[in-house]
């Protein structure tokens, strides 16, 4: 799930990205602890939409039906990464392992990933609901599979920087928790206050302001973050900072 937040920051830049994430955070009903539950809440009618990993969305489409639920990727940017498959060095049954990979990548193997449970050639007991590595499947099984779009047809210039993401992953996760999740109620109240005032540009800038710049985050991740005492102190500091910021936004005078 962190890739979704990172994609917003990379696509829009640090300042605009945090403004966007803060506004989204102000709109959401809750942040789930389990990534699979977001799509389930949509199926149950608890939320109108949710961020979800693709196969969690597709599995809920299988339950609710394609006419009632859908999964979409952002038209302007999306990060797609593959599920890796490999053979360990020194594998004792190398030939069997090679045959297994060949089968997974074959048409028969990919049909198990791509088709619904009970479809001819598809899984018989459990649906996997994963996108296929084979481009022709998306046209061949259109209207059959719950996966109704092809990642190969995406027309985007966005390139996800996995090196940048990896370098700041742990610090960014802590910041997201401290700035958006832990003070969620204060964030929601601040966002409502801004809407009542007419979404003043300076309010939106303040809503998305972070205690560290992008450069400072990378510097913190490079070495100090490995110290547990530093991590704990920073998380507490950011939580207090965020709550104070949101409360001040709530208390700002109304637009005249």
Image (cartoon, helix red, strand yellow):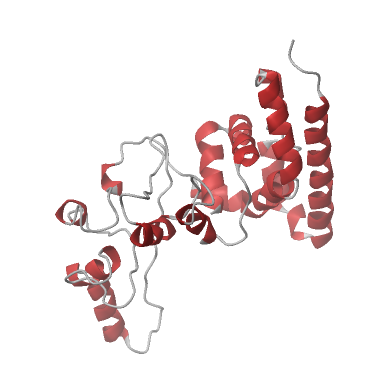
Any part of residue 170 in sight: yes
Q: Which residue is located at x 18 percent, y 57 percent?
A: 141
* Residue 188 x, y percent position in the rendering: 70, 38
Quadrant of residue 75 within the rendered picture? top left
* Residue positioned most to the bottom: 92
Which residue of the protein is positioned furthest toward the top in this rendering? 256
The outermost residue toward the front is 45
In front: 73, or 88? 73
Q: In which quarter of the image is residue 25?
A: top right
Locate residue 148, reporting x and y percent: 27, 50
Seen at 53% across and 48% down, the residue is 47
Nearer to me, 205 or 181: 181
Q: Residue at x 22, y 67 (%)?
A: 111
Q: In this view, does 207 lie to the left or right of 100?
A: right
Q: Give how far across and how far down residue 56 sits, in percent.
A: 43, 60
Quadrant position of the C terminus in the picture: top right
């Amino acid at each position: 799930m962190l890739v979704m937040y990172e994609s917003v920051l990379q696509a829009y830049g640090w300042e605009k990205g945090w403004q966007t994430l803060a506004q989204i955070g102000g709109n959401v009903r809750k942040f789930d602890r389990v990534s699979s539950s977001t799509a389930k809440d949509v199926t149950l009618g608890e939320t109108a939409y949710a961020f979800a990993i693709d196969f969690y969305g597709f599995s809920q489409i299988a339950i609710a039906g394609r006419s009632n639920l859908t999964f979409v990727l952002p038209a302007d940017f999306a990060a797609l990464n593959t599920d890796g498959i490999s053979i360990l060095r020194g594998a004792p049954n190398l030939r069997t392992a090679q045959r297994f990979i060949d089968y997974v990548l074959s048409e028969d193997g990919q049909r198990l990933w791509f088709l619904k449970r009970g479809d001819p050639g598809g899984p018989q007991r459990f649906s996997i609901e994963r996108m296929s590595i084979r481009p022709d499947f998306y046209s061949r099984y259109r209207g059959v599979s719950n996966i109704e779009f092809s990642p190969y047809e995406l027309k985007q210039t966005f390139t996800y920087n996995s090196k940048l993401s990896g370098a700041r992953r742990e610090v960014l996760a802590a910041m997201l928790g401290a700035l958006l999740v832990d003070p969620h109620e204060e964030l929601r109240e601040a966002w409502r206050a801004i809407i009542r005032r007419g979404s003043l540009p300076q309010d939106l800038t303040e809503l998305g302001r972070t205690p560290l710049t992008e450069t400072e985050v990378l510097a913190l991740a490079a070495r100090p973050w490995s110290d547990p005492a530093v991590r704990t102190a920073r998380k507490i500091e950011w939580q207090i900072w965020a709550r104070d910021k949101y409360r001040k936004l709530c208390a700002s005078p109304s637009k005249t």
